[in-house]
Image: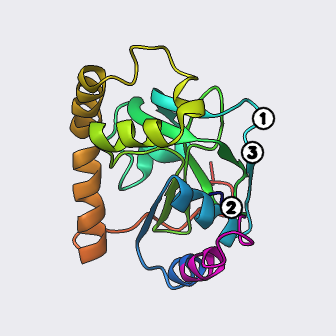
């Protein structure tokens, strides 16, 4: 399903409202893949079928300038291993959102809205079995990868890399939720004084 598929999935409207309320109340939020797309739309961004086709399988995203001072993203390496499995892409960020990660194919891979609402286009929470199940359910998407990419052995290696990178990120998010980690600073709205 896509973030705008209300006709087939009417409950998506309620999820967007919930995400909008959470962001407005500054409740720490981490929205992954479809969740990230729903967060973008809920806050005034847009999502559409990706013009460059689906992203499927392991990939890399890179940090953008705002990520270097973000409480969740700052300690990530410049390039991060992720897992992609989507047809739609975020095509416009909500007004005021800060871009945190990008890739050559689709620019809006991760963003933060206000101080603590995060949306990511990719997956950091999967297991090899989950990805293999998606590939069985969507063979037309699985066919877009090289034959050796979606094997149990390769996915085990990929997920070990993803875990090494993203588990500390998840721990920082838990600290953010519990109040042990300060949210991002308010966005600077004026030019710095020389």
**Are circles 1 and 3 on residues that touch, CB within 8 Å?**
yes
Depth check, mark 1 against mark 2: the one in front is 1
Residue 51, labelled with which disc? Answer: 1
Q: Earlier in the sequence, mark 2 or mark 3?
A: 3
Residue at (67% x, 46% y) in the render? 88
Residue 47, horizontal then vertical, whole percent: 72, 54
Q: Considering the numbered disc 3 on the image, is that residue within a helix, a strand or a loop? A: strand
Q: Which residue is mark 3?
A: 49
Give me the residue at 73% from left, 61% from top. 45
Instruction: Where is residue 76? Give x, y as percent.
Output: 34, 39
| Residue 179 appears in the figure | no
Which residue does the image show at 55% across and 57% down from the upper left?
A: 34
Q: Identify the magenta region.
A: 5-18
Q: Quick one: SS at disc 1?
A: loop
Q: Are marks 2 and 3 in contact (CB under 8 Å)?
A: no
Q: CA distance from mark 1 to mark 2?
A: 35 Å
């Amino acid at each position: 399903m896509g973030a705008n598929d209300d006709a087939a999935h009417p409950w998506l409207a309620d999820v967007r409202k919930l995400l909008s309320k959470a962001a407005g109340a500054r409740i720490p939020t981490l929205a992954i893949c479809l969740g990230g797309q729903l967060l973008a739309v809920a806050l005034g961004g847009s999502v559409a079928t990706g013009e460059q086709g689906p992203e499927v399988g392991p990939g890399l995203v890179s940090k953008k300038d705002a990520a270097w001072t973000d409480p969740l993203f700052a300690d990530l390496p410049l390039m991060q291993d992720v897992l992609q499995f989507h047809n739609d892409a975020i095509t416009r960020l909500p007004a005021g959102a800060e871009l945190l990660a990008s890739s050559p194919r689709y620019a809006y891979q991760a963003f933060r809205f206000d101080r603590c609402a995060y949306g990511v286009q990719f997956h950091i929470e999967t297991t090899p079995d989950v990805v293999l199940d998606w590939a069985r359910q969507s063979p037309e998407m699985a066919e877009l990868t090289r034959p050796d990419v979606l094997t149990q052995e390769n996915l085990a290696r990929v997920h070990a890399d993803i875990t090494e990178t993203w588990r500390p990120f998840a721990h920082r998010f838990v600290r953010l939720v519990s109040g042990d980690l300060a949210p991002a600073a308010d966005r600077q709205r004026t030019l710095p004084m020389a």
